[in-house]
Amino acid sequence: MKESTRIVSAIICIALVVFTIFAGKNGVLGEEQVQTDKDSLIIWYTDDTLTDYLSAMAVEYNEVYGVRVIPKLKAGGDYVESVYRASIDNNGAPDLYLLGSDVLEKAYMSGCAVEIQNVGDAVSPDTFPKAALSAVTYHDKLVAYPYYFETTALLYNKTYLKEMATNLVLAENSEIPENSGEDIDISELDTDLSEEELEVLIEAKVEEFIPKNFEQLLNLADKIDAPEGVETIFKWDVRSIFHNYFFVGGYVDIGGVNGDDETVMDLYNANAVTAFQVFQDMNQFFSFESSDVTYKQVLEEFIQGKLIYATVTTDALKALSKAVSEGEFTSEYGFAMIPDLTEDMITRSLSETNSIVINGYSDKKGRANAFAQFLCLGHGAELYEKTGKMPARSGIIEAGSPEYAFVEEYTYSTPMPKLMETSNYWLLMESTFAYVWAGKDASLGLKELSEQIKLQITGEEVVEEYINPVNEKEIIEYLDEEALREEALQE
């Protein structure tokens, strides 16, 4: 080979080396080459609505801290298994990834989750509500960062409530002519109240129409005259555990406070049976087939003005905003916490917390922790504005805003349990709800559910003692009979 040829070849080789280094730093090469960059971080996620947001956060983090972050959208499926397999095979495994808190036990037991480096006590009761902390705690260790949540709230048509309140206030504060009959135009009644006084009374009545418990809701449904176009007062997706669980959430406990204690299995008790009876009573009052209702349908019917109340998840915020902007929905609306069962019995919604997990097999755990804190602590407001996801961090959503009802509900919610042995709990509970909704024995349904879950946990058959359901009417009648007998004996 001539000397000139050797020189040219050397120059070409040097140029390729320089280009390779430059391209790797500037993203010109393909994804596989970038993954080999020892300074980069890989984050996996499964929700494609986060793609643009995570990409923007990655760019910002690189600009500020000089660390390249590569977001990768992955299929759901057996997600933790994919993380584990990629880690073991050293094949593009993530350094951190987004995961539902209910799968954290599996992630931790497989080594794909480790205790977080909680620098500066960043994840604490000062920064997150109890539900968020419980969701990411496993055996007294914080094994993930709470990121965003999902739960339910009560949606109501405020325009309808104002209309009903106005009619009632005018009727209560006006003189109705004698022999006027039933066909009275409320708007034409005379009242001595000023406009300001009327407005105060109407607003107070509207607040009364936002039910604090389901007894109030049933009374309202029984007494008020619904506006024209309303087909039913209240509807929800009866088939969805997420929209039903609040009925019994205050009286069943699986896994304890953090959902990780297999010794805590309290599903069958008198209060839980009573709560299921309240759920069953809702069917007797509103009378619709669970198979005829989907969540999508409930939301559509509310937008069409056919409902006054509905239970919804956080996606309703975006759907309603879109409907208003496109002129499909012209009413005012509001959100409130899910009503309690009665004055004496509470409801407690189910919540799902999506978390950021540090892969235990990563050799960049420190950097991964730093980026996780950057996401969940420093950019909560942007997360909601750009994705509609409700940030788990406290203080992001302003009190008094429509969204705040979800924050309040989340604060008192029941996090999904983490126990792998109870992964089918939700399917079994959904079946129990369907059984009770169909009018069957609530106590028997809950008894069988408890026995099956305890069998899965302990490996031994358990026979629960049947709890005879007693409603308030029967209790009152029983007490009256006892009092009469006692009076007769004294006489």
Image (tube, grey):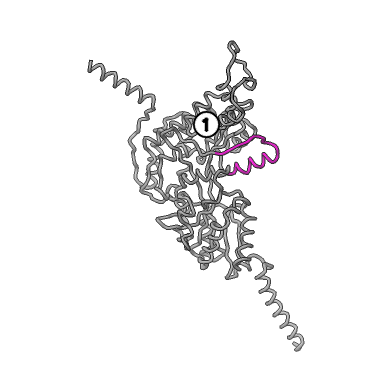
Judge from the rendering whether residue 149 lies leftward or rightward of residue 449; answer left or right. right
Task: Specify the amino acid type for callout 1.
Answer: Glu
Q: Nearer the viewer, residue 202 or 83?
A: 202
Can see residue 105? no
Furthest residue toward top: 179
Q: Position of residue 460 (x, y in %)?
A: 34, 45
Q: Secondary structure at mark 1?
A: helix
Work out whether 13 lies above or below 365.
below
Badge 1: residue crowd in 10 Å (few <14, some 14–19, many ≥20): some
Q: Nearer the viewer, residue 171 or 312?
A: 171
Task: Reply yes or no: does residue 341 show up in magenta.
Answer: no
Span of residues in magenta: 314-335
Can see residue 184? yes
Kindly identify which residue carries mark 1.
208
In which quadrant of the rendered image does the C terminus lie?
top left
Quarter of image, res 58: bottom right
Judge from the rendering whether residue 33 lies leftward or rightward of residue 468; answer left or right. right
Judge from the rendering whether residue 440 lies leftward or rightward of residue 16; answer left or right. left
Task: Reply yes or no: does residue 319 show up in magenta.
Answer: yes
Q: Position of residue 405 (x, y in %)?
A: 53, 42
Work out whether 68 lies above or below 490.
below
In which quadrant of the rendered image does the N terminus lie?
bottom right
Q: Position of residue 111 (x, y in %)?
A: 46, 61
